[in-house]
Amino acid sequence: AQSVTQPDIHITVSEGASLELRCNYSYGATPYLFWYVQSPGQGLQLLLKYFSGDTLVQGIKGFEAEFKRSQSSFNLRKPSVHWSDAAEYFCAVGLTTDSWGKLQFGAGTQVVVTP
Amino acid sequence: GAVVSQHPSWVICKSGTSVKIECRSLDFQATTMFWYRQFPKQSLMLMATSNEGSKATYEQGVEKDKFLINHASLTLSTLTVTSAHPEDSSFYICSAPDEGGEAFFGQGTRLTVV
């Protein structure tokens, strides 16, 4: 069965420091992978996605993620965090063999940014 | 990018009443839409797949008679929470995929049943 694991429930990082959020997936077919960000009480905003090609994906707001098939990982990174990056981050896998656009989400990682 | 509009943003209803939530794709057509539910500080859980012109497909454990889904057109899906109870209070979010497989999300609806 498919699954998405975000090992870190909560991460605290200082403003200006680097950030890495981990995501591991299990899916029988070629994965379509996504990272979304959610501010409190809001919908989801897509940060970046991986469908195929270059395994290092650039997204919005200075985020990037690297797909590593051998490790079944799709970790999200940002070199220098801003206070506005405090939010909930969700990794998701597209269940392409089921229904186009259907997603399974990880549990999420809450990012707190300190001054 | 594509825009998905969800309405209302928040609603408070009395226990036992029904509430309808709308999800519209504003600038593209969506034969399929998805409804998710999110409890506080938890992840999004898929409730059902809304299919234009046919019945919705519900995930295991989701009561189809309580959560009625109607995909009336290529741009509109509605979720009706029937006979709502306090335990139905949650954040409901819809999404619609474009032809490339990217899912666009609505703003979400905060439902509070009192």
Image (cartoon, coloured by chain):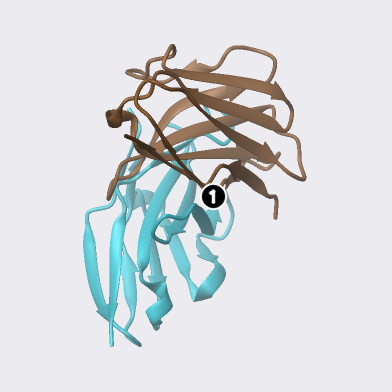
Chain colours: A cyan, B brown
The quadrant of the image that shows the N terminus of chain A is top left
Q: Secondary structure at mark 1?
A: loop
The quadrant of the image that shows the C terminus of chain A is bottom left
- Residue A97 appears in the picture as rendered: yes
Q: Is residue B106 above or below residue A85?
A: above
Name the kind of residue labelled 1 in the image: Gln
Front residue of A26/B20: it is: B20
Question: Subunit of mark 1?
Answer: B
The residue depicted at 29 percent of the width and 31 percent of the height is B86
Quarter of the image for residue B43 reads top left
The residue depicted at 49 percent of the width and 32 percent of the height is B35
Front residue of A108/A93: it is: A108
Q: Is residue B87 left or right of residue A67?
A: left
All told, the count of numbered labels is: 1
- Residue B52: x, y in percent? 68, 21
Q: Is residue A61 above or below residue A26?
A: below
- Residue B68: x, y in percent? 51, 18
Around disc 1, counting alpha carbons within 10 Å, would you say few (fewer than 14), some (14 to 19), or many (20 or more)?
A: many
Identify the residue under disc 1: B107
